[in-house]
């Protein structure tokens, strides 16, 4: 039976993670190994393992027999798994569902993608699955006010279809496929497109400035401001999602 590792960068309690893991359950034996808290933006970083001394905890996820939480980022979760910590040899890695697209320059910083890049280093193919959020073009993060509007089922079905196809006809060498899904119902998707990594994402941070911290002389916070959503070419990952298409990008 295929051994499928499921992880994310939003933490073990993420609804998107649970939905994704359950969607994989008829394709093989699923094991969740995910961070114990939010690790968005960590890319493929492992962290200073000799200092943080990560702990591993057994967790319960409905519908999944094997679930573990790690005190470190998603790349570390994958590294532990590929080193045999969980007494399994994994055949495929699925990372997500991230609330907020990982397109354009954000590809280089995404913990969701960093997990599958780490898997590729160990000779294992995988996919990263992200879903657009409302009110941010397609870029954004999982703020509480948007999570209850995420149509997780759409991204889960897209991931299931993709993984089923890749397991039936595996790539010739370890590969990473970055998938970005509009926050639409399955019926409202315009289709699927193979795309290229774009440049600037659909909505970027336009300015950053120091803001004094009250009561702490010489200390500052960084105040960042978002720019307006931009129109992107449809052949790019961000442009395809903005136009209502599932974006598939080989990295």
Image (spheres, rainbow, N blue to C red):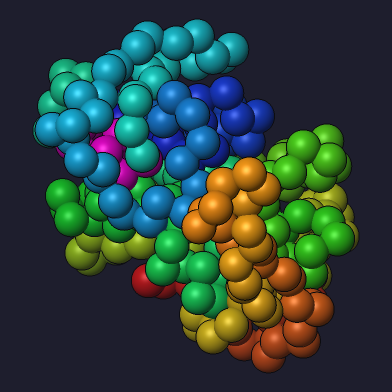
**The N terminus appears in which quarter of the rendering?**
top left
**The C terminus appears in which quarter of the rendering?**
bottom left
Image quadrant in which you'd find residue 184: bottom right
Magenta stretch bounds: 74-82
Residue 170 appears in the picture as rendered: no
Residue 73 appears in the picture as rendered: yes
Determine if the magenta segment contains residue 78: yes
Q: Horizontal placement of 175 versus 106: left or right?
A: left
Given residues 26 and 243, the one toward you in this image is 243
Q: Residue at x 79, y 69 (%)?
A: 137
Q: Position of residue 185 (x, y in %)?
A: 84, 51
Q: Residue at x 41, y 30 (%)?
A: 35
Determine if the magenta segment contains residue 107: no
Q: Horizontal placement of 186 versus 247: left or right?
A: right
Q: Position of residue 2 (x, y in %)?
A: 31, 32
- Could you tell me what secondary structure mostly forms the magenta stretch? helix
Q: Residue at x 43, y 62 (%)?
A: 109
Image quadrant in which you'd find residue 237: bottom right
Vertical placement of residue 131 versus 1, above or below: below
Given residues 91 and 86, the one toward you in this image is 86
Vertical placement of residue 182 versus 185, above or below: below
Q: Position of residue 83 (x, y in %)?
A: 12, 33
Q: Position of residue 5 (x, y in %)?
A: 35, 34
Q: Residue at x 63, y 58 (%)?
A: 212
Q: Horizontal placement of 191 versus 101: left or right?
A: right
């Amino acid at each position: 039976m295929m051994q499928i590792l499921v992880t994310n960068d939003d933490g073990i309690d993420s609804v998107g993670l649970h939905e994704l893991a359950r969607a994989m359950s008829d394709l093989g034996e699923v094991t969740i190994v995910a961070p114990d808290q939010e690790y968005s933006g960590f890319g493929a970083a492992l962290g200073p393992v000799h200092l943080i001394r990560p702990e591993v905890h057994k967790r319960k996820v409905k519908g999944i027999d094997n679930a573990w939480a790690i005190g470190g980022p998603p790349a570390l979760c994958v590294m532990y798994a590929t080193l045999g910590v969980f007494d399994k040899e994994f055949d495929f890695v699925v990372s997500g569902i991230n609330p907020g697209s990982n397109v354009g320059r954000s590809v280089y910083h995404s913990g969701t993608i960093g997990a599958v890049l780490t898997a590729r280093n160990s000779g294992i193919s995988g996919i990263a699955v992200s879903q657009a959020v409302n009110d941010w073009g397609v870029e954004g993060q999982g703020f509480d006010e948007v999570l209850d509007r995420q149509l997780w089922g759409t991204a889960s079905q897209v991931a299931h279809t993709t993984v089923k196809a890749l397991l039936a006809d595996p790539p010739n060498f370890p590969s990473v496929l970055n998938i970005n899904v509009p926050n639409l119902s399955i019926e409202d998707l315009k289709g699927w497109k193979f795309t290229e990594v774009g440049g600037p994402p659909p909505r970027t941070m336009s300015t950053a400035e120091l803001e004094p911290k009250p009561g702490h002389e010489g200390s500052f916070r960084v105040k960042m401001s978002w720019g307006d959503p931009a129109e992107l070419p449809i052949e790019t990952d961000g442009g395809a999602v903005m136009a209502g298409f599932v974006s598939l990008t080989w990295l």
